[in-house]
Image: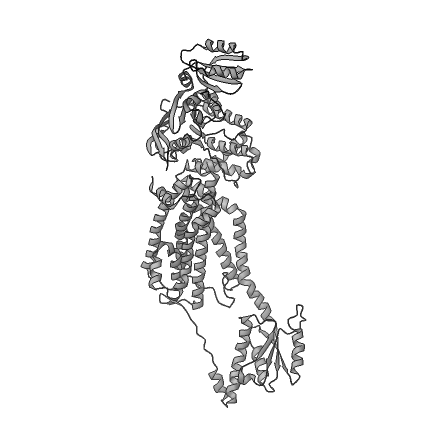
């Protein structure tokens, strides 16, 4: 139980003009959900491909499930959902899923049986004999999801699993992932959407420009966020409020979402000073709460605003 | 190993299930039968009931003798005569008779008694060797040949007789030369004519050319499809790219072999049933299927399999570099040209299958698969040369498969611009 499921030791991958991943090390322990976070282009997919042995690191090495070797040799024990997902459009859904199972080393009939079970589980039983191209995009994603999970892998690696899903399907997939982790298996997934990671992950690694900037359990990361964080909602005089938030002797970071903001105070600063100042400016404060920093604000603090994704944000200079 | 088999099986089953495959498999034999037999049937129908009128202005027995000679012409192998001849001796009114006959000829809805053609002989025909023929069917060289061949000896005989030669001497002098060519292989008479040998070589050449190109390009698009579908990434997470490459090549090859098997099988079946010439558009003259030795069949099969492996690997590498059909077509042009060049070489080999050129190209892996079976069909080859050619091809395959594997490995995960030659070289070199 103590051997880590995934160990990457200073892995580096260079492409023609740039270094996609630089001397990255990470450890995934057994069980639970591990988040690999980073803005677009940070090197998440390259890292995952190296972990799986799809591409070979230029330097460093990877140990999976306690064994040196490529993910291919262990593929029966690993489930993988790539970021760029695809299916054979003209193949029947059941055949397709069974083939993916066979590619993972399942026997032919076992693969067909499991594929059938998974299609039922995801509510696609009636579509088993239809062509993949007849399925909606959401349904196709469910099929791909089933493809990554149907052979009961110990380790499931999902690259941006929730991208492009509507809220309903996204919820279905999240429930499945949580189920998988609860059954004692290990899930590693990458995302650039911090809300997902915050709700699901036990352990996160944040990478930016190919390098690791944060590594720890969710609690550690939040603690290390260090500063006192305050969540604010104001109803008027937003302009005046911003003046106060610009006070560098008091406020270190601001994650301003318009009517709400999350601010990190300068170390040692008293949150009450901020409260007093805001009340004085009459900003119609409807929320003032000392909180743990959100993953989002940690992410932005570490990665820098230029890489801030999905919500546009401004930071007072 | 099971994984490769799964890839091969998927490729084979999905391929065989497509409409294009099913239609192609059924349609080609139908077309072969159509092209092979239809002209023959049509010609037979046409020749079976050719009504000729001999308009005889000679005032002698020349017209009657020619009519008799025409009447004796046989259509094909059987006893059926080719012409139904009506001999009509005419005087000075011949022009009006001719015109009335012409009016009946070549009608779209001809009455059963209408002539197909009118042969006009006059008193000068014997000396000048000229006669005129008016007919609705003058485009058929077979027909005009038959008429000429029937008339010529009669005219010749009449000319000699007029020089007071004894008719028995004339008859003896008139015996025509007929050169029977028969192929000898390894000291055995094969019962195969020169014409058949050429036909066989030509057929093998076309077969190999078609098979290498057609199925090679299918491999290229299958690889590209997997890449553009992005399914390849899931597959390479559990199979080595090289295994995947081999699975694709073998899967497409198996489907191709089955399709060709069906085509050749039906072709042979039909031609045996009808004991008519082979299905590859053979001339509709009555010649037998060429005798094909077991060794030749073995060489054809080996060369197809090895040649397919050779070219399919190249095509797979090309498919892995490209993102669109057009791009793949363009990129494949040099490879396609090599196949075409190998096919065209055959025409140089026919005259001298043991020339230095023929020997040299046999050992160039790009051409071996096309050249070796053709040469073997044309002339007996020493065993070391056959084995040497196959060995050269095997070595070529090792090189090409290695190269294709290196390119494929990187290509399937590279999207965007097609690599330049320099980038390609880097793909090959890097680990």
The mark tally for this picture is 0
Left or right: A278, with B426 as reference point = right
At 49% from the left and 53% from the top, the residue drawn is B262
Where residue A1 appears, x then y in whole percent? 37, 22
Where residue A101 appears, x then y in whole percent? 46, 35
Name which quarter of the figure residue A37 lies in: top left
Where residue A139 appears, x then y in whole percent? 54, 33
Where residue A301 appears, x then y in whole percent? 42, 21
Q: Which of B49 and B57 is in front in this view?
A: B57
At 38% from the left and 61% from the top, the residue drawn is B375
Q: Evaluate whether residue B74 shows in this view.
A: no
Q: Which of A266 and B213 is in front in this view?
A: A266
Residue placed farthest to the bottom in the image? B164
Q: Evaluate whether residue A297 shows in this view.
A: yes
At 47% from the left and 9% from the top, the residue drawn is A272
Q: Which of B389 and B289 is in front in this view?
A: B389
Residue placed farthest to the left in the image? B384
Vertical relation: A292 (above or below) A211 = above
Quadrant the C terminus of chain A occupies: top left
Vertical relation: B364 (above or below) B243 = below
Q: How is the image coloured?
A: one colour
At 48% from the left and 47% from the top, the residue drawn is B326
Q: Which of A285 and A78 is in front in this view?
A: A285
Left or right: A90, with B114 as reference point = left
Vertical relation: B295 (above or below) A117 = below
């Amino acid at each position: 139980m103590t051997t880590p499921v995934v160990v990457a030791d200073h892995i580096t991958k260079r492409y023609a003009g740039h270094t996609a991943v630089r001397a990255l090390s990470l450890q995934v322990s057994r069980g639970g959900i591990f988040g690999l976070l980073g803005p677009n282009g940070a090197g998440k997919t390259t890292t995952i491909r190296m972990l799986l042995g799809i591409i070979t690191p230029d330097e460093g090495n990877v140990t999976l499930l306690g064994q040196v070797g490529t993910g291919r040799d262990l593929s029966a024990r690993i489930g993988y959902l790539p970021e760029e997902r695809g299916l054979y459009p003209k193949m029947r859904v059941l055949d397709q899923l069974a083939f993916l199972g066979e590619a993972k080393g399942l026997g032919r009939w076992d693969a067909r049986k499991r594929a059938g079970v998974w299609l039922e589980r995801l509510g696609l039983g009636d579509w088993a004999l239809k062509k993949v191209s007849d399925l909606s995009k959401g349904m196709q994603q469910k099929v791909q999801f089933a493809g990554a999970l149907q052979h009961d892998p110990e380790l499931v690696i999902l690259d941006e699993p929730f991208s492009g899903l509507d809220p309903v399907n996204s919820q279905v997939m999240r429930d499945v992932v949580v189920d998988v982790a609860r059954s004692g298996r290990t899930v590693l997934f990458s995302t650039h959407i911090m809300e997902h990671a915050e709700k699901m992950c036990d352990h996160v690694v944040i990478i930016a420009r190919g390098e690791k900037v944060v590594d720890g359990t969710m609690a550690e990361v939040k603690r290390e966020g260090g500063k006192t964080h305050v969540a604010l909602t104001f109803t008027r005089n937003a302009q005046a409020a911003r003046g106060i938030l610009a006070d560098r002797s008091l406020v270190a970071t601001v994650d301003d979402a318009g009517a709400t903001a999350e601010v990190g105070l300068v170390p040692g600063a008293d949150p009450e000073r901020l409260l007093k100042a805001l009340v004085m400016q009459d900003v119609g404060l409807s929320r003032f709460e000392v909180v743990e920093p959100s993953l989002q604000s940690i992410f932005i603090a570490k990665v820098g605003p230029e890489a801030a994704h999905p919500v546009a944000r401004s930071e007072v200079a | 190993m099971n994984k490769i088999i799964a890839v091969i099986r998927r490729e084979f089953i999905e391929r065989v299930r497509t409409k294009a495959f099913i239609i192609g498999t059924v349609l080609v034999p139908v077309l072969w039968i159509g092209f092979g037999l239809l002209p023959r049937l049509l010609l037979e129908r046409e020749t079976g009931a050719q009504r000729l009128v001999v308009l005889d202005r000679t005032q002698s027995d020349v017209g009657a003798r020619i009519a008799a000679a025409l009447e004796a012409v046989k259509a094909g192998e059987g006893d059926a005569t080719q012409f139904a001849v009506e001999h009509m001796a005419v005087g000075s009114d011949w022009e009006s008779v001719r015109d009335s006959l012409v009016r009946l000829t070549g009608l779209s809805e001809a009455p059963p008694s209408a002539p197909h053609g009118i042969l006009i002989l006059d008193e000068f025909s014997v000396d000048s060797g000229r006669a005129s023929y008016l007919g609705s069917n003058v485009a058929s060289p077979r027909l005009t040949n038959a008429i000429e061949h029937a008339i010529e000896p009669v005219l010749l005989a009449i000319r000699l007789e007029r020089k007071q030669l004894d008719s028995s001497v004339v008859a003896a002098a008139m015996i025509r030369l007929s050169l029977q060519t028969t192929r000898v292989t390894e000291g055995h008479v094969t019962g195969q004519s020169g014409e058949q040998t050429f036909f066989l070589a030509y057929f093998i050449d076309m077969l190999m050319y078609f098979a290498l190109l057609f199925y090679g390009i299918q491999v290229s698009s299958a690889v590209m499809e997997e890449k553009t579908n992005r399914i390849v990434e899931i597959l390479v997470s559990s199979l080595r790219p090289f295994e995947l490459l081999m699975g694709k090549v073998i899967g497409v090859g198996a489907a191709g072999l089955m399709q060709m098997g069906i085509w050749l099988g039906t072709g042979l079946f039909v031609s045996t049933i009808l004991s008519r010439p082979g299905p590859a558009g053979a001339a509709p003259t009555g010649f037998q299927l060429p005798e094909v030795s077991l060794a030749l069949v073995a060489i054809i099969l080996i060369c197809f399999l090895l040649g397919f492996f050779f070219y399919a690997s190249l095509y797979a590498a090309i498919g892995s570099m490209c993102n669109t059909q057009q791009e793949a077509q363009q990129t494949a042009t040099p490879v396609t040209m090599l196949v075409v060049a190998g096919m065209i070489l055959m025409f140089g080999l026919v005259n001298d299958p043991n020339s230095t050129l023929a020997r040299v190209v046999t050992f160039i892996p790009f051409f071996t698969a096309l050249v070796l079976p053709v040469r073997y069909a044309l002339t007996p080859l020493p065993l070391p040369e056959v084995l040497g050619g196959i060995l050269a091809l095997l070595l070529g395959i090792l090189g090409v498969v290695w190269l294709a594997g290196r390119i494929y490995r990187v290509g399937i995960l590279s999207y965007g611009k097609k690599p330049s030659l320099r980038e390609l070289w880097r793909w090959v070199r890097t680990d």
